[in-house]
Amino acid sequence: MDQQTLTVTELNNYIKGLLDQDPMLGNVSVRGELSNYKVYPSGHHYFTLKDSESSLRCVMFKSSAGKLRFRPENGMGVTAYGRIAVYPRDGAYQLYCTGLMPEGAGDLQVAFEQLKAQLAAEGLFDRAHKKPLPQFPSRIAIITSSAGAAVHDMIRILSHRWPMAQVVLLPVRVQGVEAPPEIVGAIRYANEFKVADVIITGRGGGSIEDLWAFNDERVARAIYASELPVISAVGHEPDVTISDYVADARASTPSNAAEIVVPDQRDIRDALDSFSIRQDQALRKKLMHLSQQLEAYQSKRVMTDPVAHIDNRRISLDYARDRLVAAEERNLAACRQRFVGLAASLDAMSPLRVLGRGYAIAEDGLGQAIKSVKSLSPGDTITVELCDGKADCLVQSVTEKP
Amino acid sequence: MAVKKLSFEQSLSRLDEIVRHLEKGDLPLSESLSLYEEGTGLIKSCSKMLDEAEQKVVKLKKGPDRAPIELPFEDEN
């Protein structure tokens, strides 16, 4: 038995040669679950692909890894493409991977979901950050391709709806690797030079790859950072991009963006008509009210016959004067009657009238009337006054009434 | 009033204010009349702005100092 003894290197190189010749192992696709996924500073990715019973070491060099459109994660089901070869130093075979596809959804779909989750977690989609759109923009920046149908649709709709707004086009490429940096640059430029009040960025419909620039993280961050409000207008109705989530407003299509960004002049003309009608009505009502008030005043006598007012006053004055005169006369008559009465009773009380009827007044020497015999003694001289004269008399005796 | 030129937006909100005032009906006639006059003026000027508006479309190009230069945009449609 002629057996050749080989060095380890020789054996490993021999096996390597065998595997390298195998056409199937040179271009293999293998399904499994990612584990131990590591990205080295060199840019190479190392991982293990496994199923329930077995595992396979894999390496993906920087050149291939840079083309990945999603971020591989442990536990993710994938299909890996590449070739099987021996790594002679370790004497182990591994998969030199040139491409990875997530299982189920496409790689772009996975990338989309991953970026969406990441940016949502960072708060880029928060309602609170969304800026209101100007009601009547005077300048509208459109960041899109100058060649596509989208820009023409937008200009046509804008000119019908709101020709007062100026359209400022910032032409960019909207697909391909240059698209994201160009869109980012245009958004920043529009903000730096304040070229408009509002920005529309987007493009017409296409495949998910065609729309991919609007799922780019750089574009999303530029939209978020924009001080001018941004309307995202990508593709057709069902297409939703990261730009749509982060923008201040989402339009389902570029045409829809043109409808969102300006009012319809027909609505504004209607509003002007309604203002006109309302102020006419308000003023007419005011005038009617005032003229009714005026009529009410006019119907009063003081307005129809101003002299009547004075005449009325004069008549009242005359009445008052009459009443005054009558009252005075009545007063005078009453006084006169009272005087006559008083004079009569005064006459009746007069002592002279009593003396006339045969009475006399006895007076003492001082002229005082003597009212009692107690003040008299025999021999006193008294004066007796009669109605027509006086007589001096001597008291002979005094007799008191029993 | 109308001393300084109002923007379209300002004109509309002023009109709204004027009409509300007038509809309240508690202003003296002279003030009502001058508001009405102002309102009529604003409606006229807004309508005129709409009638005369002609959409201007420009294409921006970065100038040598980075400042934007406006170029005409030919809409071939």
Image (cartoon, rainbow, N blue to C red):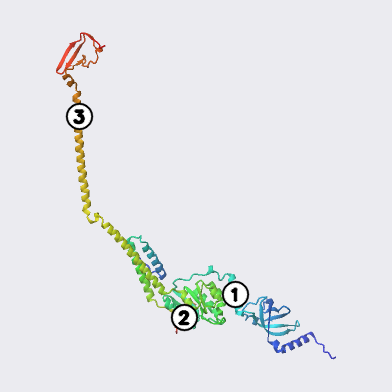
Query: Can marks 3 and 2 be said to lie on one chain?
Result: yes
Q: Is residue A367 above or below residue A292?
A: above
Query: Can marks 2 and 1 be said to lie on one chain?
Result: yes
- Farthest residue toward the right? A1
Percent coordinates x, y for residue A201 in the rendering: 51, 77
Residue at x 20% of width, y 28% of height:
A342
- Residue B53 is tagged as none
Local crowd size for mark 3, using a 10 Å CA cut-off: few (<14), some (14–19), many (≥20)? few
Residue under label 1, please give it.
A115
Residue at x 21% of width, y 51% of height:
A310
Percent coordinates x, y for residue B23 in the rendering: 37, 63
Task: Give the SS element for disc 3.
Answer: helix
Any part of residue A339 in sight: yes
- Badge 3 amino acid: Gly
Task: Give the SS element for disc 1.
Answer: helix
Is label 1 in contact with label 3 (beta carbons under 8 Å)? no
Percent coordinates x, y for residue A325 in the rendering: 19, 40
Ranked by sequence position, the earlier of labels 1 and 3 is 1
Residue under label 3, please give it.
A341
Residue under label 2, please give it.
A153
- Say which quarter of the image contains residue A391: top left
Local crowd size for mark 1, using a 10 Å CA cut-off: few (<14), some (14–19), many (≥20)? some
Q: In the picture provided, is A49 more to the left or to the right than A140?
A: right
Task: Give the SS element for disc 2.
Answer: helix
Ranked by sequence position, the earlier of labels 2 and 1 is 1
CA gap between label 1 and label 3 equals: 130 Å
Give whichever of A218, A51 is nearer the camera: A51
Disc 3 versus disc 2: nearer the observer = 3
Q: Quadrant of the N terminus of chain A?
A: bottom right
